[in-house]
Image: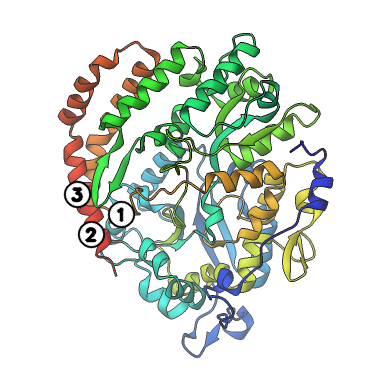
Amino acid sequence: MKKKRGLTSILCSILILSVLFTGCTSGTKGGEEAAPPPDKPETGGQTEEQGPVDYPSSLSYWVGLNANASATMADLGESKLYKHLEQVTGTKVEWRHPAGDGAQVEEQFNLMIASKKLPDVIERNWASVTRGPDDAINTGTILRLNELIDEHAPNLKKYLDDHPEIKKMVMTDEGNIYSFPFIRGHEKLNVFFGPIIRKDWLDKVQMEVPTTVDEWEQVLTAFKEQNNGQPPFVQTISHMKIGHAFIGAFGIPLEFYNDNGTVKYGSMEPEYKEYLTLMNRWYKLGLFDPDFAAMDTQLMDSKITTGNVLSFVGYTGSGIGKYMGLMEKDPEFELVATPYPTLNKGDTAVWGQKDFPYTGIGAAITTAAKNPEQIVRWLDYAYSPEGHNLFNFGIEGESFNMVDGKPTYTDVILDNADGLPVTQSMAQYIRAVYNGPFVQDPGYIEQYLVLPSQQEALVHWEKATNQLRMPMVSHTADESRKIASIMTDLNVYHEEMMLRFIMGSTSLDEYDNYVNTLKSMGIEEVLKIQQTALERFAQRD
């Protein structure tokens, strides 16, 4: 496969494979009849089942502003999506975006909750909220939505009724639905991260794409010898935790997993020592970039685009797509994805990156809302056929056209006249490029991944079984407090020791002492909590 030149020519030749099923838009399957869209405000918003409920005239909405959106907008009110939604519903939104990201956003969220000055809607990952979503309901922060959805959200209700496996995920152990969820509507949307390698360099050293750990070591050794001794491979600490590349070859992840009904912690199992031994070996051999522990985006970009790093783990978009775009004028530069490696040739990878259809992200309605029924109707619009297209494809005739019955992005998205990257032009019209309270459509990813190497990446990476993953368990408030009190310090110690073992400043002869320290810090108590949570999850209806 040779590198394609020019995004326009690629886009013209690409065959969009998706078909927009009614099941994606309203929760129906196959040719079943779709739920009717919500009525417009001027009709009074009345249906036979619901009674008179209108859209709200206004509401306040707290959510972090995605980087792709913040690159061109001060708030989501400037997006074409929400301007159009205001025209449809008549609802004026007051957007409240916390500054910064990560820990800064979490700190501002906690301060907001403590102040009790709440907006009407809060969108975030509720699975990671302190003490859990049940506690947020019980302490009067957000509303239980079950009855409100049953009475006033026909589109989301139908989707959950038609997809009981998703409904099980979006509910807590106490049976509460706490948010309008972000749902990935197809398996191919769950996979977007894995091992990547320079195909032109494989050709240069006359070797095939590696599939086993031993083959990887042979390829990396050849790369180093042919590239003036430069360490050819990098994997950051955070990326080790996302896809579990290479550690997964030993049958474990770094974190908690479900071994046939028994919860275990990968980073204290004997196989973890084998993984550390491999990484330490690669580090000593000069195959593993010594800057991996402090690698930031800027340094990573520099190493990859200058040809110092020839293999890494990353994303289909901000990995393969980003670097192929940056290096488009270099006719030699070519990246391809590799399968997640195994120990033995022909084995199927046990671990790889594969998200759940639902991961906890959603829009919750707070107790401050004076008109929750109307807000429910407003949020439910995104799960209607019209709302589904709006959140995934934008505005018909502007950001997409119907081609052979399928929503197809226009050049406004894919070849923006202002020179915006596709992710930024998408963020002006849709939320499918990141997340939000709607069902993500596979037609988005099939058009976003325009390079053949990106499409092939999904084929390689989705083969990992991931059958040992922990499901979306939830914890009680007391369990959440206990886990936080133990894991906060334990995670710091774990990461420090991982670095020391890989870099050789602590001998792997000390591995048993490391495991004993994890036990003294309380890992076994957390395992018991996780085991109880797993058993509760299995009993959900």
Instruction: Specify the farthest residue to the front.
Output: 345
Q: Which mark is residue 536?
A: 2
Residue 201 visible in the picture: yes
Secondary structure of the residue carrying numbered label 2: helix
On the rendered structure, is 331 left or right of 450?
Answer: right
Give the class, few, some or many, for how many residues have Cα within 10 Å of label 3's Cα (few <14, many ≥20): few
- The disc labelled 1 sits on which kind of residue? Val
Q: Residue at x 46, y 61 (%)?
A: 181
Residues at circles 1 and 2 in contact by the CB criterion of under 8 Å = yes
Q: Earlier in the sequence, mark 1 or mark 2?
A: 1
Q: Quadrant of the C terminus?
A: bottom left
Circle 3 residue? 478
- The disc labelled 3 sits on which kind of residue? Asp
Q: Residue at x 29, y 59 (%)?
A: 134
Q: Earlier in the sequence, mark 2 or mark 3?
A: 3
Mark 2 or mark 3, which is nearer to you?
Answer: 2
Circle 1 residue? 473
Instruction: Specify the farthest residue to the bottom.
Output: 48
- The disc labelled 2 sits on which kind of residue? Arg
Give the class, few, some or many, for how many residues have Cα within 10 Å of label 1's Cα (few <14, many ≥20): some
